[in-house]
Amino acid sequence: MATSTNAPSKLSVIGAGAVGSSLAYACLIRGSADEIALYDLDEKKAEAEVRDLCHGTQFTPSSGVIGGGNIEVVKDSNVVIITAGAKQRPGQTRLDLAATNVNILKSLMPQLLEHAPNALYVLVTNPCDVLTVVAQKISGLPTSRV
């Protein structure tokens, strides 16, 4: 993404757990955007992950990493990747997990749209097929953007 235009690009990862942090790292080393933002409700976790990622920025094509527990870090993102959600517990059905993660998404999506209204949204949170449809309905965005 960073090499396709002259305009600065920004990619935000929502959720600083194992998947989100790994994704932010992969995007950083690939140069997927000029700026990588990492957001999590657990501010200390997000800030620690950002510090770790920042140590390697001089070796990557990306120009910076920001993040924390304030949703405003996603402001003006071109791409928002959502990894936030509950993990599936032993014995929990896929539908039970979906119900939990739909509630998280219902709270999160309006805030993301407020700060990154023109972004492309990618859902990684399980069950991602169900949550993608829910995100489309919540956001009102066309399928080409969710």
Image (cartoon, rainbow, N blue to C red):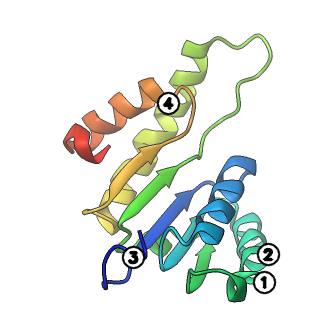
> Could you tell me if the residues under marks 1 and 2 are in contact, i.e. CB atoms within 8 Å?
yes
Can you say which quadrant of the picture contains the N terminus?
Answer: bottom left
Give residue 131's position: percent from left, percent from top: 44, 31
* Disc marking residue 64: none
For mark 4, give the secondary structure. helix
Q: Amino acid at mark 4?
A: Cys
Q: CA distance from mark 2 to mark 4?
A: 28 Å
Q: Is residue 15 visible?
A: yes
Q: CA distance from mark 1 to mark 2?
A: 6 Å
Q: Is residue 88 left or right of residue 6?
A: right
* Disc marking residue 55: 1
Can you say which quadrant of the picture contains the C terminus?
Answer: top left
* Disc marking residue 9: 3
Q: Which residue bears the numbered disc 2?
A: 52
Q: CA distance from mark 4 to mark 1?
A: 31 Å
* Disc marking residue 128: 4
Kindly identify the residue that appears in the image at 72 percent across and 74 percent down: 47
Q: Nearer the viewer, residue 114 or 16?
A: 16
Which of disc 3 and disc 2 is earlier in sequence?
A: 3
Q: Amino acid at mark 2?
A: Asp
Give residue 27's position: percent from left, percent from top: 59, 64
Please tell me in which quadrant of the rendered image residue 36 appears. bottom right
